[in-house]
Image: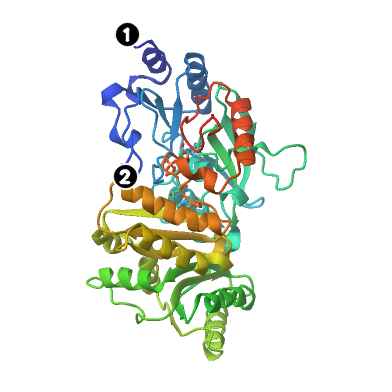
Amino acid sequence: MPDRFGDRLAALVGDRHLQRGEAVDERYRKDLTGKYATAPGWAVRAESTAEVSAIMRMAHEAGIPVTVIGGQSGTSGAAVPSDGGLALSLERMNKVHAIDTLSMTMDVEAGCILQVAQEFAEAQGAFLPLDLGARGSAMIGGTIGTNAGGNRVVRWGMMRDMVIGLEAVLADGTVVSSLTKMLKDNAGYHWKHLLIGSEGTLGIVTRAVLRLRPLPTTRQTALIAAPSFEQMIRVMRRLEVSLSGQLSSFELMWADFYAAMTEAQLPSRPRPMANGYGIYALVEAMGGNAALDGQMFEQALAALMEEGLLSDAVIAQSDQQREALWAVREDLSPGFTPRRPFTAYDVSMAIADMPAFVDLALANLKQAAPDATALFYGHAGDGNLHANVSNGRMDAEIKQAFDLAIYRAVSDLGGSISAEHGIGIDRLPYIGMTRTPEELDLMRTLKHAIDPRGILNPGKVFTMDAQ
Ligand SMILES: Cc1cc2nc3c(=O)[nH]c(=O)nc-3n(C[C@H](O)[C@H](O)[C@H](O)COP(=O)(O)OP(=O)(O)OC[C@H]3O[C@@H](n4cnc5c(N)ncnc54)[C@H](O)[C@@H]3O)c2cc1C
């Protein structure tokens, strides 16, 4: 069969950067979970914005669906291409063009890996605060496409707060560019905010200007435990003040999560603190005064212990100890592997509603399957909570029962069904549980106006027909 579209792509990017049909590599077909394996017609690695624009013009003309692939670190199927569609990778567009240490900005291409961008900034005495467990694989484009949050939202916000300028290619190949370093700009609509978090359905981000900060020179890390959730959040609010604005991370771990993770890590790492406290958190402060910051951190925690708000605290005394504390929260594989098969949720709600959510979710899960168990942990900074749910089996029926158990609890509390990995394919049937019909209609109107042929990542986030 002649492949005229493929031949035109090959003429543009060269045979080396095009894969066709069955030759399309696995990493362009699947996300991290491997749940949705598809059969794209082509995978292409673009080298420049001009190439992305030409590719989109061709796809638009031919009505071929295009999914932009980032680091595939998402788990909702958001970056899985359509059958017979085009998988567009920006991995070759990975340059850091410039770092401006006066304006504190970084001009970076969308295919740059987050950790590479962080290290580039640090080499110039600047700091890109966005940080998450998938830092070694997630790309700048993917973190913009999902409005990523992560470990430091409590102080510096999420990706939406860091994108100053943006360049993107629209469905018909039009390049829209505002690679400005300006922080405040009230001239009309901020179209960049439409694209941030839109999961590749409204445009392809090709380059961005990100906001940097001066590189902190001190870092204090502690594992803390409190008798109850409410006391732990009071601790966070107190530290926001007593650490004079240096509080940078506050990662919550429910007691069962802490016990399971530390138990599984025991052969290689001793448990840093006893089991059995009400709730745990990993706390980090970043500052600039080597003589005083450590002392301020210790004193703040000691005062909270004296008042009885904290039950226990372990402060890292070296980089090695810091890594060991972070591993309790980030080295999830030893603790989660024995729970396979499981379903992972990333929901959000007002911080004060988190305990009610946990109670409600557990009650709903027990109704769905009496042997269901769930481990809870999350980022207090953005009200983002993970639930890892398992009962030893995972077929479509039990998965749907768990989905409904979790999303009903979120919906009852006015929360959101996704705070990290997006809606993708996985959560598409449930978006109406936390978005109103009017909101969904507005989304459809915007999508139709910007992508009238519906070629950008179709079948993700919402359907074009009102249900
Ligand atoms: C261990 C681990 C920890 C994580 N921790 C966090 C966390 O703390 N906070 C958090 O928010 N997320 C977290 N995530 C989820 C995930 O890493 C983020 O969603 C990340 O932003 C995805 O980036 P990616 O490059 O892998 O994108 P992909 O997964 O490849 O794509 C995600 C979506 O973005 C779209 N996209 C990709 N590139 C572009 C582009 N150039 N233009 C427009 N759209 C694009 C894709 O089409 C897709 O819809 C974590 C994941 C893992 C595995």
Residue farthest left in this picture: 267
Q: Nearer the viewer, residue 425 or 100?
A: 425
- Which residue is denoted by mark 1 in the rendering? 2
User: Can you tell me which quadrant of the image ligand 1 is in?
Assistant: top left
Determine if the C-beta at disc 2 is less than 8 A from ligand 1.
no
Q: Nearer the viewer, residue 97 or 375?
A: 375
- Residue type pointed to by label 1: Pro
Task: Give left or right: position of 248 versus 7.
Answer: right
Q: Position of residue 220 (x, y in %)?
A: 49, 74
- Look at the picture and state if 253 lies above or below 165: below
Q: Nearer the viewer, residue 26 or 178?
A: 26
Colouring of the image = rainbow
Q: Secondary structure at mark 1?
A: loop
Q: Position of residue 392 (x, y in %)?
A: 25, 57
Counting residues from the start of the chain, the first of labels 2 and 1 encountered is 1
> Distance from label 2 to label 1 (Cα)?
39 Å
